[in-house]
Image (cartoon, rainbow, N blue to C red):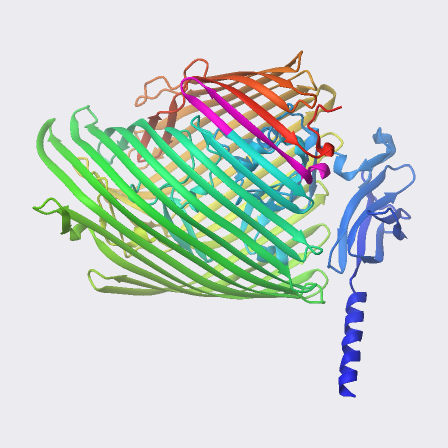
Amino acid sequence: MRKHSLSLLLLLTISLFSFSQTASIKGTVIDTTESRNLSNSVVSIIRKSDSVLVGFSRTDQKGDFKIDKIKKGEYILLITYPKFADYVDILKVAEEPELFVGKIILTPKSQLLKEVVVRQRMGAIRMKGDTLSFMADSFAVREGATVEDLLKKLPGLQVNKNGEITAQGEKVQKVLVDGEEFFSDDPAVVTQNLRADAVKEVQVFDKKSDQASFTGIDDGEKSKTINLKLKDDRNRGLFGKVSLGGGLPGSFAGEGMLNAFKGKRKIAAFGIMSNTGKVGLNWQDADKYGGNNNNYEYNEDEGNFFSFSQGDDEFGDNWGGTFGGQGLPTAWTGGTHFSNKWLEDKFHVNGNYRFNKQNLFGKSSTITQYVLPDTQYFNNQNQDIYKQNQRHSLNGFYEIKLDSLSTLKISVNGSTTNSRNNSRFYSEALNGTGIPVNKSNRHLVSVSDRQQFISSAIWRKKFKKKGRTISWSIDQNYNNIESDGIVQSQNEFYTSGIADSTSTIDQQKLNKSKTSVISTRIAYTEPLSKSAFIEMNYSYRVNNSEALRGSFDKSTNGKYEILNPLFSNDYDFRINTNSGGINFRVNKSKYNYSFGGNISNADFRQLDLVKDSLSTYSFTNFFPRANFRYNFGPQKRVGLNYNGNTRQPSLEQLQPIRENTDPLNIQIGNPDLKQEFRHSISLNYNDYKILTSRNMYMSVYYAFIQRAISSSITVDNSGKRETQYVNVDGNYLLNGYAGYWKQIKKWSLNLGVNANVNISHNTNFLNKLENVNNNRSGSVGLNFNHDKEKKYSFSVNPRFGYTTSRSSLRKDVKTNYWTSDNEIEATIELPWKMQINTNADISLREKTAVFGDDNNVVKWNAWLAKKFWKSNSGEIRFSIFDILDQNIGLRRTANSNFISENRYDTFRRYWLLSFTWNFTKNPAMATPGTK
């Protein structure tokens, strides 16, 4: 009897659970001109697959509506009201019991030429929540243009010469395709190889962490992200491109990309080989590949290591896999991608493999003016460099819906990197009157290998009560770097211009570093009301790091076997962190806000194995956070955020060792260095007018840093510099960005203006004297684009900037200079399916007392193309790069302690004859031009 009762109870539970898998759709209808609620509006829910009416209602006196018992699936929302344009939108009903579509604005027919406003087409730009969307077809680009060309047309987005994308002043970290990570988040692969005409919509938003997206409660982790929504006909079939080219002097370039899409299943592969600077890598790979001359730091609040630039480390794994225009690279790059969802998205898999190989050689020269409390001196350095780097990487994730309310996601990321470096340096230091102080001749040879493996698993569960969730995650990060190198240096020192002493270094450097991080976190959310929620979390993290640095001098037999203890050390570093916190969130139709924080205790253990010295200490911190967003309307909002977090000293900053890779610039570890605490506040505003196609945006970021990690630099009479990191107070920085964009459809014009400002107030020490640095820079840019479909297009984008730098120790030394960067491009459609394009980058730099050479560069390029075949899928192009042969590599760095200008080898004038084939197998995806 009990067995039958249990079976009956189980059957009833399943039946009730199945019956509950419906949702209610709620919203409010208002008038766009008078902002009044529209009662008795007709609201219909139509099934998208067969156009069957499944729900119907009318709005009440407040303009509100609610339609119940809508099953999971995709539907068309249709709202009608007399003398107003019909409103149409696509809705997707998932497991959530309630779907709130917000305030829906109807527009009087008198203001529109069309009778039906389809939401996806009613403006070039639209905003929904935190997502800003650009309708790709509203921004004209030439036939065959890439996604990168399209992004350059969008207001608030900028793409620099290295392919780096910024959106409203913030660097874009990821580019997704239909919400999927594509080639390990490598934006260059997507933006430079995917055609613009395949994209339906470009979405820009701050991507939250998986945990924040799941619970709806902000945890402070965000990354600026672009999502490319493809057109429906590009989600099936086979398409891609192949391009091959060659020219003089000895230039070649080839690339190809193949995409096989079938709904949610995406298979893709790409390959690039080039000696013209086309490497196909993005700027973010620097951290992924384990280098870019960065050191690791521990972020106690976020729970992992991140990197920051700290100058050259020729014996680390310092290849970023990137190419910023410095030197002459030959590159081979390739990769494959697979992703799929099946069984109504119950299973989701995503995987990527990448191979990169790059040979880089070149010359550079650097002029630096150092400012000291009582004097100044100049350093001139020439460098010859050859680097060879190779990397394999594999990453992916597998996600499964265990049931309708819980999921499990497992992610892995592994890579192996080999780097070889052979560099020669010659430098000369002069005092303020031009008399020699020292001269140095260095030769560095190194080989390094790195292995990295990262894995994570997260289980998430929603309960039937809306807003109640629980999640548990486990993360692991392993890093191992080994390097072997030789440093040879001959140095001469002068007194009153006369050589009086020399020093010679001939050492082998054997370095090993290993980091292992394991962490776990559990979080629970509970609804306090329909619009208020609370989250409670706890996490534990253990970090173990080891760093062995060995320096060996030559013995009498010529072998490197005598340990030099002054430049050698063996160091262990361990951090145990316990953290718990509470956060509150309130969601309303016009606004939402959240506040809370975490309390964290971190126990540090530093062990110097050479000196047998143990140091332990603990920190207890409170990490507050709060954010507020107010919606003035569907396309106008303002947001305010505050976040507090710590930054722990890196192992390299703590390790008590003298680093003499550059004997004239010694770095010394400081085991007494303490953590810093940063208070960050940001304000964002966005306003878009649909009917007038006008967009205004603004962003301000301010940070105040307590116990900031800064530098203490000592320079002796011979020009030797010793740098050690110390804690200082009073540092702050301020960044601001604003823009205005207007589309004049009548004349096919896009007009825009934007400005940004950067202010920093930093303290360091020079020869044990406090030095307060105030650095300021700002720029103003204009954007002008005009397109005449199938005839011509041109754009003009000038930008003017100004930089100032002041030092409290030397108020008489002032650094001021202006810069101007201008881009001009024009494309003309010719008869016989031909196109001609010309573009120029005009860079102007003000001459200074230190840098008197000509700094102006006009990089002028042009190409002539002929399309053929009925679908215009084939193209032959003749290109000339740097027609005036003026391209020079130039980078200027300004600081209150020094101002530096680096000139380096880069690509000069060359021509290329190339053939490109854009192919497609699905007739529905025919290349534009097909009739």
Residue 117 at least partly seen: yes
Q: Is residue 153 left or right of residue 847?
A: right
* Span highlighted in magenta in the image: 230-254
Nearer to me, 357 or 727: 357
The quadrant in which the N terminus is found is bottom right
| Image quadrant containing the C terminus | top right
Q: Position of residue 803 (x, y in %)?
A: 42, 29
Q: Is residue 242 magenta?
A: yes
| Residue most extreme to the top | 831
The location of residue 852, given as percent across then percent down, is 32, 19
Residue drawn where x is 18% and y is 32% of the image: 440
Closest to the observer, 928 or 367: 928
> Relative to residue 777, is residue 461 drawn left or right?
right
Task: Place residue 751 in its image quadrant.
Answer: top right
The residue furthest bottom is 1
Give the image quarter of residue 114.
top right
Above or below for 102 versus 371: below
Is 129 colored magenta in this rendering? no
**Percent from the top left, x then y, of residue 147?**
60, 32
Please name the residue shown 92% across and 39% down the image. Answer: 82
**What predominant SS class does the magenta segment belong to?**
strand
- Residue 904 as seen in the image, left or right of residue 30: left
Judge whether 250 appears above or below 55 on screen. Answer: above
* Residue 776: x %, y % from top left: 43, 34
Most foreground residue, 240 or 824: 240
Please state which of residues 665 and 885 is positioned toward the viewer in this rendering: 885
Q: Look at the image and tell me whether residue 311 can be seen.
A: no
